[in-house]
Amino acid sequence: MAGWFWRRPLLPSERDFVRQHFGAALDGLLPGIHLYLRRVGDTRRALSLNGGRISMPRACFMAGDPCQPLRLTNAQIAGWFAHELLHQWQRAQGLPVTRQALWLQLRHLLGGRNPYDYARCGDAQAMHDCFARAQVEQQGQIWEDHVRACVAGQPAQEFALVARRVRGGVPQDASMG
């Protein structure tokens, strides 16, 4: 049963990834962020809960071993991890991420809108404004798309102001909580 509750702190390469994409914005949270192996529900998707718990699918770890580092050179895996880390950032901003995300997912299951859909803009200011107005899952998807592009070696200029905001360079406005 002990394996069921397995967790580990972030490894050095994972902490470096966090600092690369979030700057110092998550430094205060890093000691409390732990990785878990996703075992319940859709085990092909990542999940972030309160208290710094990020559950990742087995395939995201080197050799499928959760004791090994995440495969962060894979743009998809890096994007998933960044998405879940953004939820930690949102919680630090005071947003009730879990409650909002559960409601959004429930609405989607009942035939509502996909909570991850957003209108991608080619202009950095328009993309920043979209991010500022977005709900928690749309913000996570925007950030995931930004990090995927960076890891794939094709950073997209339209995410520049969003990246600056998340890293701490743009003041929080009223729409962010």
Image (cartoon, grey):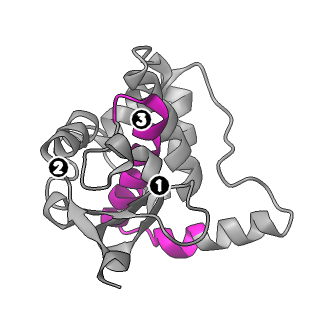
Contact (Cβ within 8 Å) of mark 3 with mark 1: no
Q: Mark 3 is on which residue type?
A: Val
* Within-10-Å neighbours for mark 1: few <14, some 14–19, many 20+: many
Q: Nearer the viewer, mark 2 or mark 3?
A: 2
Q: According to the image, label 3 marks what residue? A: 162
* Within-10-Å neighbours for mark 3: few <14, some 14–19, many 20+: many
Task: State whether residue 74 appears in this view.
Answer: yes
Secondary structure found at label 2: loop
Q: According to the image, label 2 marks what residue? A: 11
Q: CA distance from mark 2 to mark 3?
A: 26 Å
Q: According to the image, label 1 marks what residue? A: 57
Q: Specify which label sits upstream in the sequence, 1 or 2.
A: 2
Task: Name the chief secondary structure element in magenta.
Answer: helix
Q: Specify which label sits upstream in the sequence, 2 or 3.
A: 2
Q: Position of residue 149 (x, y in %)?
A: 46, 23
* Within-10-Å neighbours for mark 2: few <14, some 14–19, many 20+: some
Secondary structure found at label 3: helix
Which residue sits at x=51%, y=33%?
Answer: 145
Residue extent of the magenta highlight:
72-101
Residue 40 vertical placement versus 77 (above, below): below
As drawn, the residue found furthest toward the right would be 111
Q: Which residue is nearer to you in this view: 63 or 170? A: 63
Q: Mark 2 is on which residue type?
A: Leu
Q: Position of residue 123 (x, y in %)?
A: 55, 20
Q: Position of residue 163 (x, y in %)?
A: 36, 33
Residue 117 magenta? no
Q: Which residue is nearer to you in this view: 149 or 161? A: 149
